[in-house]
Amino acid sequence: MLWPAVIIAACSYIPNLNEGFGPIDSRNHRALSLTFLRFSPSDRVLSNREREFSFRVTSANDFRQVPGLLEDQETERLAFKWKRGFAKGDLEVEVPFLFRGGGFLDPIILGWHEHILHWVEPGRAEAPSGRSIVEGPGFSFGSAGGLGDISVFWNQRLNGHWSWSSGVKAPTGNAHTLMGSGAFDAGQMMKYVGRLGKGWSFHGELGLIAQGKPTVLPGGRGLVHQEGMALTWQPNSRDNWVAQWQAEASALQLGIPGSDATHRMLVFGYQRRLSNREVLELCFMEDRDVFNGRWPEGANIAPDFSIQAGITLRY
């Protein structure tokens, strides 16, 4: 379990976040999407000589059973990020570690669906608890763990409202165990922030990613769009509440509508400044279940339920 390490770190050491908060640093944790390059909604750009280290642990439980496709597993993703500011922008490196298995969220999600969302996921209640399988046309993966694909980004602020990011992902993860795609990806994203007054801010992003042809997975898309919006409320200097919407094209085209449709999810998060050098970030992510599957434009394909905790240290 990775969660105790996060809690211990949150209560001990951490580095000067003089600028405002922003969107939650999150992504769609569907197992078939995690192996490809994606941009973070975060729009902070470090100033010259500033350094930042962060790590986040995410537990993403997924169940998807449609003709030709079965995904029933939980992925624990531990992501380490290092950023260094320069005169014209900052350099960012992300190193992820993935652990896919049965997980611990199955019974919690069944209760959440039944008593909170009043929604029963077809097949989940009858599925074996703790199963770990990702199976589709031409591929089948079970439990696995290890280093994922490492990504490098260059982030630059253009003015008070706009910034842009450019990124590349290297095939450092094992594609045969679904730790990586086996290919390089590259992309760019524009980001916008506007202050709405009385602690409210709006954030938006729009990007395009060129995916390299995966070596094991079939039907990899050449180009993937990625976009998102976030509304943040900072009532004081220490707290920030976030509601955000993220969307992206599916990483693969399998000829299965329940897999190929645009991926959309909702993120609800909280950020707490623990000191002038540290920020704690907590969030949960939801898929189509939040609307009982009736509004795919609002939320569609993503893990059933994800929880995430992170800490950011600046020095």
Image (cartoon, grey):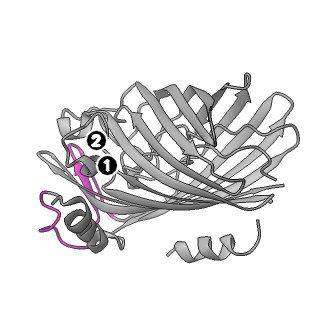
Q: Identify the magenta region.
A: 122-142
Residue 36: x %, y % from top left = 46, 40
Q: In the rendered image, is residue 252 in sight?
A: yes
Residue 137: x %, y % from top left = 20, 43
Q: In the rendered image, is residue 174 in sight?
A: no
Up-down relation of residue 14 to residue 49 (above or below)? below
Q: Is residue 128 magenta?
A: yes
Pointer 2 and pointer 1: residues touching (CB < 8 Å)?
yes
Q: Quadrant of residue 8?
A: bottom right
Up-down relation of residue 67 to residue 272 (above or below)? above
Residue at horizontal 24 percent and vertical 59 percent from the top: 117
Residue 288: x %, y % from top left = 26, 46
Please, what secondary structure does the residue beneath circle 1 have? Answer: loop
From the viewer's side, name the closer residue of 164 and 70.
164
Q: In the image, which disc is placed on residue 287?
A: 1
CA neighbours of label 1 inside 10 A, class few (<14), some (14 to 19), many (20+): many
Q: Residue flagged by tag 1: what amino acid is it?
A: Asp
CA neighbours of label 2 inside 10 A, class few (<14), some (14 to 19), many (20+): many
Q: Quadrant of residue 194?
A: top right
Residue at horizontal 29 percent and vertical 33 percent from the top: 297
Q: Residue flagged by tag 2: what amino acid is it?
A: Asn
158 vs 64, left or right, is right
Considering the whole magenta stretch, tell me its main secondary structure: loop
- Could you tell which of marks 2 and 1 lies nearer the N-terminus? 1
Q: In the image, which disc is placed on residue 300?
A: 2
